[in-house]
Image (tube, rainbow, N blue to C red):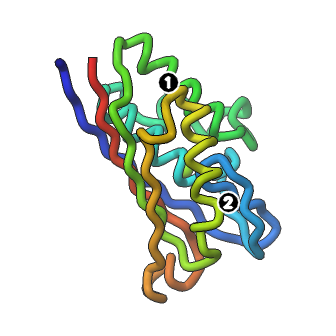
């Protein structure tokens, strides 16, 4: 079996007047993430982990934020298109593990819905996905609620 690992990281600013999308789920909050698409940091980190594992460059290459086509895009579609690229190159997902960094709100109530949304978009089983979340203990841009960040790793095989 040919086994590869990939790593992804993403950040978006948090501002008032935007919706907060994380892991394909719209989360009620006083702030939302700013970006060209729906600015879903978790899905973007996952896409980059998958693209990195398979040597298919990165999310900015395939879905540039200069393209009007991806303006306000649902990031679940970016993940679906990433999966098309993976499958065309002969790769399958082993598992995805991710960590969200945000101060508020608590993510636990939305965790299962995120896993289901990611599983559906990536056409994998929910038991192949793990989502963890942590605050930044009040430190830095995450701690000051100026932004949200996500890390993801993925194993793929062919
Ligand atoms: Mg992004």
Location of residue 91 with respect to 37 vertically, above or below: above
Structural distance between the alpha carbons of marks 1 and 2: 25 Å
Image quarter where the N terminus lies is top left
Left or right of residue 49: residue 19: right
Location of residue 23 with respect to 60 vertically, above or below: below
Q: Name the residue rendered at 35%, 12% in the picture.
A: 90
Location of residue 134 with respect to 143 vertically, above or below: above
Q: Name the residue rendered at 59%, 68% in the picture.
A: 107
Q: Where is residue 23 in the image (x, y as percent from the top left)?
A: 59, 50
Q: Name the residue rendered at 52%, 52% in the picture.
A: 42
Which corner quadrant of the image does residue 34 belong to?
A: bottom right
- Say what secondary structure mark 1 lies in: helix
Q: Name the residue rendered at 20%, 27% in the picture.
A: 3
Which corner quadrant of the image does residue 123 belong to?
A: top right
Q: Name the residue under label 1.
A: 83
Crowding near the residue tagged with mark 2, few <14, some 14–19, many ≥20 C-alpha atoms within 10 Å:
many
Q: Mark 2 points at which residue?
A: 34
Q: Which residue lies most toward the front here? A: 127
Q: Which residue lies most toward the right here? A: 17
Left or right of residue 157: residue 113: right
Q: In the image, which is nearer the foreground, mark 1 or mark 2?
A: 1
Q: Nearer the viewer, residue 47 or 96?
A: 96
Which corner quadrant of the image does residue 77 belong to?
A: top right
- Say what secondary structure mark 2 lies in: loop
């Amino acid at each position: 079996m040919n086994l590869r690992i990939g790593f992804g990281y993403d950040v978006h600013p948090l501002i008032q007047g935007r919706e907060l999308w994380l892991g394909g789920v719209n989360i009620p909050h006083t702030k939302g993430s700013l970006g060209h698409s729906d600015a879903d940091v978790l899905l973007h980190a996952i896409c980059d982990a998958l693209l990195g594992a398979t040597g298919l460059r990165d999310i900015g290459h395939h879905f540039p934020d200069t393209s009007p086509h991806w303006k306000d895009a649902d990031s679940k579609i970016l993940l679906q298109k990433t999966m098309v690229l993976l499958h065309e190159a002969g790769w399958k997902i082993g598992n995805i593990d991710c960590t969200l960094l945000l101060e508020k709100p608590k993510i636990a109530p939305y965790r299962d819905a995120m896993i289901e949304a990611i599983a559906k978009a990536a056409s994998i089983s929910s038991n192949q996905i793990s989502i963890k979340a942590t605050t930044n203990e009040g430190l830095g841009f995450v701690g000051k609620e100026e932004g949200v960040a996500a890390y993801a790793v993925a194993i793929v095989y062919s």
